[in-house]
Image (cartoon, grey):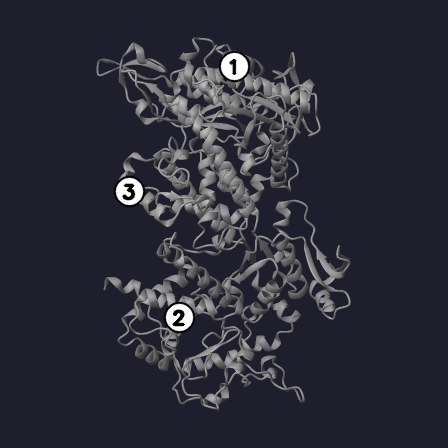
Amino acid sequence: GKDEKMVTVRLHACPDSGLFKPSRFYPSKNNIRTAWFMEQSTPKEGATEPPTPHYNNSILCDTVMLSHLHFLSNTAMDFPGMKDGLALLKVWLNQRQLSKGLGCFSGFLVSMLVAYLLMKRKIVKMMSGYQVLRSTLQFLASTDLSVTGISLAKDADPSLPVLDDFHQAFEVVFVDPSGLVNLCADMTASKYHQVQFEAKRSMEILDDRMVDGFQALLMTPKPMLRTFDHIFHLKHVSKLQSTCKKMQLLNELMDRGGNYVAAALPFVVSLLARGLSQRAQLVAHSLPQIPEWPIDAEPPKHKDVGPLTFGLLFLPEFAASTLEKGPQADHPEASEFRTFWGEKSELRRFQDGSICEAVVWEASTVGQKRLIPEQIIRHLLKLHADIPESSICYTGALLESVIRTGKEAWGTGEEAMVSVVCSYDDLSRKLWSLKELPLTVTAVQGVHPALRYTDVFPPIPMKPIYSFHNRRKHLLLPSQEKPCPAYITPLKIICHMEGSGQWPQDKGAIKRIKAAFHLQLAELLQQQHQLVCRPAVTHTDVYKDGYVFRLQVAYHREPLILKEVVTPEGMLKYQETEESRQLELETLHLPYLTSSLHGLQQQHPVFGSTSRLAKRWISAQLLSDSISEECVDLLVAFLFLHPAPFTPPSSPQVGFLRFLNLLAAFDWKNNPLIVNLNTGLTDSDCTEIKNKFVAARSRLPVMFLATPKDQWSSMWTRERPSAQILQRLVLLASESLRALEEQLMDPLSDQDVKMVFRPPLDFYDVLIHLNPNQIPRHLESVDRPIKSVSRGVVKNNFATNILFPVVDYDPVQLYLQELRVSMAGWGGRWVALVPGRLWVEMKGWLWDSGSKFFNSRTDLIEEACSDAFNELALFFYDKHGGEMIAVLWKPLSFQPQPFKVSSMKGRKVTTLNNELVCVPNVEAILEDFEILGEGLVKSVEARTEKWTI
């Protein structure tokens, strides 16, 4: 009928139960003659034949098939919970890729295990399916079958082999009811330890009330790529033939019928487990899948199982250690250590005076230290298993190339971040100890992403080259003739001043007092600590150690004063305003988030790098303006704080893959994402958040993030992303994840992982191509430019008494801001985007605006303008060195509208059905794009004809 395609019928040929004499097939007996196997004519004189336990076991398996079937059906009689429990256990094994292949933990095996637990009264027939699942997982978690085997045989027949006989022949032991067959004969100890590890982790998840256990254990797939911190492939399994020779595995090869993969695998895995014993809590391998073949064709060869994959799960505190310390030189174990590590082992004297054997691995940066396991694996496999390096494809850190900084192609920026944080700590100590301030500094809090280790490209100490700039008094300005200067990011720091009765209670007056503090801070830092400062109304920039720190004074009552509103009746009441909300965000919530994530980085050293990969990907997809950095940091923090069913990531790559999976698979519409920073939420809090979320769903942001300090408002996602952008992110994440997993799991492909960082452009209507000389961050692009131009700075962190560099100047961002706001608003005051002039004019507007205060250029521009292009189009850009701006027309703006003089921005008049209507004047708009960006825009390319009406 209809279901015939869903059913596969397998026929097993079984010999009659009395055909063979069972005692011939005990694990210690031999049934294959060496001379026959080696195709020699006469056997060697006096040679003893080795036992062939796997061969014997495989024949016995065929003889007991029917009895196993009867045994299981008797066990399942009047035990409805067994059927449900086994269904759950099989799903659990399937999701972990443990149930298919040679030596797997199959559904049959787990059924026999439940029968064993019933026999031992660990399970009773009254139990439900869930209780069967729990009891089985509990047993697996606490019992190591590679040390103490178990048996289903009831009556002890003295002639049958005992468990010790099985342990000598097999790595994992579970004997069937006949007492003859080991059901786990093909399983490696490593695979059983993986099952055991998964069972332990699953028990922890079931006992954790903060986690939805059902979702985590049974609904979440755990492919190797997202489970293990590092993955590597043995590309050509045929190389295991030479491993069998090198390790002298002739007996094992004979026992396995010449299958060199099955013979060598247990030895290769135990070799790796020994070499990585200090660094990895688990070394696992994929299961060789023997392909099916038509009965009229040749059976597949042993090499047809395809590449073998190995997964490493690290102990984060030891994984990156450069030293492998061995026994003291005069101890008997020293020679064994030397044999194991080969020429890498050498005698060294340690600080405590001992002289020991040791292996030291070469690695200078954090990124290289993370790859020490790769050095160990390549060395050991070459030395002991005769596997050449070319056959090993190690994919542990392929993605990290996109966050490597500058010309030193090795470092992934962790060291740069640490030096920024050290410089910041020193500055905050100097601020605490400033003398002659009218009010003392009560707190200094960093808010820039670099101070929580999540800045995609951390700032590098810079000193400007004067000849590259125009000089104006004591300021440097960009020069028109030269390329745009390197981008120097201001590292924002909030400086809280103590409360006092002297503070005014009027918002305008508070801003003036803060401006006075900014002037005084600059003066005192210059006098007392010889730091070069540049004060402004809203902040003071401090040049220190080659970095620019932006100090912003905060007064704790200011947000409250901004909320004051006087009603027409003269009553004073408090209500949130946009200004007060923004100020609270900057001076309260952002410092708290930064310090929490700084703490998370101390617990999980790869948190920062994972977040940087995630942001680099979002920026590469041209969406960095559509989702806030804080939101991405929280999404990544979620992966470390709530990793179930995984363990917290210990490599940036696996963290990034899980980030893509979280974006793609999380149900944003029906669930809040709860990020429990500093474990500030209890399970009752979480339940309350979920209930309130469901009740108020329609009024809440499309992506809702709750944290202990922000349970109801999801402040980091309130404005963005929009529903359309989130939909686009989800789509891009699932496609990127699929493409990456294909690449990383196929060692024979070219493994160009950067392809997921190259955005699809067929989606956009217009591309504005930019002149690379005016892109200050050009070196940060995914595909590094072949030749780079000098940007007028040298790396230097000892400069004192210098002219202040150009800070926070990125022509492309300024151009984007102009595109997003109106041309009309400038009152015909056109400024071509020649760097030097634009900057001076902008500064002029900023500070000429009298007593009106603006926090940044954006505020000013938005204040001055009404949207023109913004009504017509959306603009997308990769801020890390992108060479083009992508434009998407808004579909609604292309519908003809009735002619009104007031709404003629960017439109032209035409007639439709004898009526005057306005339609967008696309040709003029594209021309304006070029005029606006003179000197920056190379060309404007219209890619679609969507706008022809």
Residue type indicated by callout 1: Met
Q: CA distance from mark 2 to mark 3?
A: 40 Å
Identify the image quadrant of the C terminus: top left
Q: Is residue 309 above or below residue 901?
A: below
Q: Residues within 10 Å of mark 1 (few under 14, many from 20)?
A: some
> What is the secondary structure assignment of the residue under circle 2?
helix
Q: Residues within 10 Å of mark 3 (few under 14, many from 20)?
A: some
Tag on residue 795?
none
Distance between the alpha carbons at the discs numbered 1 and 2: 72 Å
Q: Nearer the viewer, residue 704 or 169?
A: 704
Q: Report whether 590 appears left or right of 40.
A: left
Left or right: residue 865 versus residue 300 is left
Q: Which residue is mark 2?
A: 110
Q: Tell me what residue is drawn at x 26 percent, y 63 percent.
A: 3
Nearest to viewer (mark 1 / mark 3):
3
Vertical comparison of 25 with 98: above or below: below
Q: Position of residue 229 (x, y in %)?
A: 53, 53
Residue under numbered circle 1: 842
